[in-house]
Image: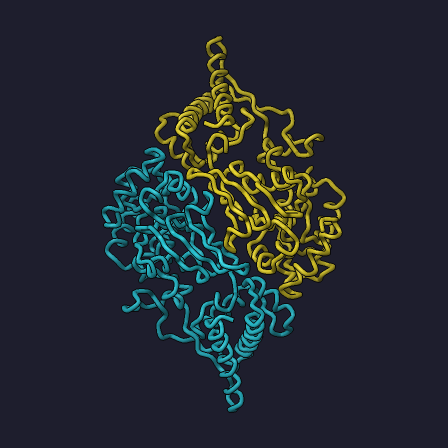
Chain colours: A yellow, B cyan
Amino acid sequence: MREIERRCLQALIGIVQNIYDQMKAGQVPELHIATRTKHNIEFNEESEVWVYGDRKSVRSAKTVKGAYRILKMTYVIGFLKEQLNLNKSSTLRELYYISEGWGAAKFEEQPESDRLVEDLEILTNFQREHFHIRPEEDGATVIGPLRVREETRRGVREIHCQDDVGEGGYQIPVNVDRIEFVDHDAKFVIAIETGGMRDRLVENGFDEKYNAIIVHLKGQPARSTRRLLRRLNTELNLPVVVFTDGDPWSYRIFASVAYGSIKSAHLSEYLATPAAQFVGIRPTDIVKYDLPADKLTDEDIKALNAILTDPRFDSEFWKKEVNLQLEIKKKSEQQALAKYGLDYVTDVYLPERLAELGVV
Amino acid sequence: MREIERRCLQALIGIVQNIYDQMKAGQVPELHIATRTKHNIEFNEESEVWVYGDRKSVRSAKTVKGAYRILKMTYVIGFLKEQLNLNKSSTLRELYYISEGWGAAKFEEQPESDRLVEDLEILTNFQREHFHIRPEEDGATVIGPLRVREETRRGVREIHCQDDVGEGGYQIPVNVDRIEFVDHDAKFVIAIETGGMRDRLVENGFDEKYNAIIVHLKGQPARSTRRLLRRLNTELNLPVVVFTDGDPWSYRIFASVAYGSIKSAHLSEYLATPAAQFVGIRPTDIVKYDLPADKLTDEDIKALNAILTDPRFDSEFWKKEVNLQLEIKKKSEQQALAKYGLDYVTDVYLPERLAELGVV
């Protein structure tokens, strides 16, 4: 077992020990866990990310429901202990099915076991990757002037993300902390929402011309992708820019990269890249470039209004852009730039925007 | 330009030539294209796949709508000619946006340009990959004892799909025909629906123990994934087995691998693997292994009834299984096997099933 996993296991066992001690002292056992809503996230000045505030929820065995929750937690910790000792791992989905054999501690549905794993993350200050719990999610691919060393079950692999991969790029593993950055020749990192645009930049040799590391976000990015971006930013000191469609869902993608997501604010310091910059598409671009656009739907309008009250978007830039979008009632996709030809995005749009930001 | 692309371009120009000749002869130009519905697919005994029958639809300039269709086709062919000459490529989405600059030939919505590309495939007997039109779709990953040589824009790359990749595997490119199989040590290919199960087999070393090539289908497989499976089957003579969840949508995934899909029956001889065998969760397994299961929804029941009249599923095996499922009204996922522990699928379930089929 690696040192970090040993400490993680100790923290897990500490939870059970605490429950045991309470019972031994004749108390009804209870646990205190940070409340996970948008009303309980606050900005941490030091780390520049959004984290949970002081509000706590109590899980107490005083109620039947609370008692079951604590029972299930002890079963899960028992399973994780065995798993870590055997150096195995499992998916969130498998964990849910494994509980089939636990009698009264069986989970009713997967969201229940998912939430319990989140509780354990918050209680231990470790991440589910340390518990060896894998998501179903599918990590990003990387192409660019970067050499990584990945520790796999089959030995160590050293891979250059341009020279040793096909055009599909390097597929990042679920646990990004198994990767070490060996060396690189990059000036910045560009994270891209859609596969079509990622392929466009690769075809046009954008990574080679601008020494850029191209990361495909695949829509709302998986944890492993966000972790990779943060590591590229903090360890290699590379600027990170995020290139998405111009609609509220895409702004949320940017926010989850830059500020952390509400659902996993306990992990913001591990996953968020506060220095990340947004390179588009902006509502002002829809006007300026006269981009092909679709009408906003009712859901889009609702999501834009929600952004106006989301503390993560409390800036002049976002207020102006979101209000403009509500006014023009339009949204555009990044591939809409193809209106001006296939090379416009790499020859004109991105170089201009990146120069404005001082990235190139 | 490669030889195959030169021939493809000739075929595209032939369509325009034909339209031109009809007009020059004083005729109203028209085109005849196979009808793409489930009533016009038939089994080709020789190639053992489902292909379009003799029903044709006519696109004639006699109507305003038909005239526009022919106009748009000539614009698209003009664009493809330029693209092939420049050795560029574009996505289906980009093609739709590019038409913004075509005045009256502008597409109203993307499904219209997508269908036109399908028309061109049927008329020319080439595939959109030859036109250099890329999908948004995201190809599969491969891990196993196989060495490939990929021709990229940055030179040729030789990659062993166990030794030269991380745990994420080798990301296959959009155009699988740019890959050459160099050598291999594999006994069979296993294509897997979900990422969680793919990761389970990789973690348990299934590819090493059984000399298996593990391909992740990522749900309904992309064309490139189906093309890869066909090539592994026909060129390397490897058996292909498909491991999915036990519900009607998963049976359709199997069918699209084995028999071809209705929407792209003109490509069946290029994409389908008629020898593929189903090792996925069967309704009989749900009963036999007492698997954790969900109730069928109304949509599930409708989809199962549709399968009973789908010519691709006209066999004793599928009739029996589908009828059993309608009777027990349950469906199960492949990860439900975790009920018996994390290794059950690789230690018991798959070895038993593969032995029954004579694969191991």
Q: Where, by quadrant of the figure, is residue B348 drawn? A: top left
Residue A248 appears in view = no
Q: Nearer the viewer, residue B297 or A291?
A: A291
Percent x, y for residue A324?
73, 52
* Quadrant of the snapshot with the N terminus of chain A: top left
Percent x, y for residue A155?
44, 38
The residue furthest bottom is B25
Residue located at (55% from left, 79% from top): B67
Residue located at (45% from left, 68% from top): B127
Q: Is residue A343 above or below residue A95?
A: below
Residue A232 appears in view = yes
Percent x, y for residue B158?
45, 54
A254 sits left or right of A94 in the view = right
Q: Is residue A314 above or below residue B37?
A: above
Q: Nearer the viewer, residue B255 or B177?
A: B177
Q: Nearer the viewer, residue A347 or B53?
A: A347
Residue located at (33% from left, 61% from top): B234
Q: How many marks?
A: 0
Percent x, y for residue B340?
32, 33
Q: Is residue A235 above or below residue A121?
A: below
Q: Is residue B161 above or below residue A273?
A: below
